[in-house]
Image: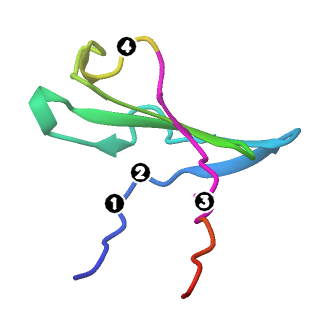
């Protein structure tokens, strides 16, 4: 239907060499998922990959959901090339 921007959850990307890096501001993106008080998101965009690390934190600062060792890595795939079809 439509997307709604969540106050405090925006990510501003900054160029660092050949990549773009950004994150939410600590404690500014509210969340109630799985007992969290707020969410943090970190993003790294490169020419061939994107890393996204989303985590939820409770009021004491303890992590309550999300990956603990690093973000999810999405690697760019090249389009599959179809073999030419021969016609009789």
Q: Secondary structure at mark 3?
A: loop
**Numbered label attached to residue 79:** 3
Mark 2 / mark 3, whichever is N-terminal: 2
Mark 3 / mark 1, whichever is N-terminal: 1
Mark 3 / mark 4, whichever is N-terminal: 4
Question: Relative to 27, is 29 above or below?
Answer: below
Q: Position of residue 52 (x, y in %)?
A: 49, 37
**Disc 2: which residue:** 9
Task: Compute the Cα span from label 3 to label 1.
Answer: 34 Å
Task: Compute the Cα span from label 1 to label 4.
Answer: 24 Å
Q: Secondary structure at mark 1?
A: loop
Mark 3, other Cα within 10 Å: few <14 / some 14–19 / many ≥20: few
Q: Which residues are magenta?
A: 70-82
Task: Compute the Cα span from label 3 to label 4.
Answer: 32 Å
Q: Secondary structure at mark 4?
A: loop
Question: Quick check: is 3 in the magenta stretch?
Answer: no
**Disc 1: which residue:** 6
Task: Compute the Cα span from label 4 to label 2.
Answer: 20 Å
Which corner quadrant of the image does residue 68 belong to? top left
Please name the residue shown 11% across and 30% down the image.
34
- Left or right side of 46 for 70: left
Q: Position of residue 23 (x, y in %)?
A: 55, 40
Please name the residue shown 47% across and 26% down the image.
71
Mark 1 / mark 4, whichever is N-terminal: 1
Q: Nearer the viewer, residue 32 or 55?
A: 55
């Amino acid at each position: 239907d439509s997307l709604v921007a969540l106050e405090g959850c925006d990510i501003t990307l900054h160029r660092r060499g050949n990549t773009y890096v950004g994150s939410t501001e600590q404690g500014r993106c509210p969340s109630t998922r799985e007992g969290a008080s707020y969410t943090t998101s970190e993003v790294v965009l490169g020419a061939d990959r994107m890393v996204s690390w989303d985590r939820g934190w409770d009021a004491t600062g303890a992590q309550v959901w999300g990956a603990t060792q690093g973000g999810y890595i999405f690697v760019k795939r090249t389009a599959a090339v179809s073999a030419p079809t021969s016609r009789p």
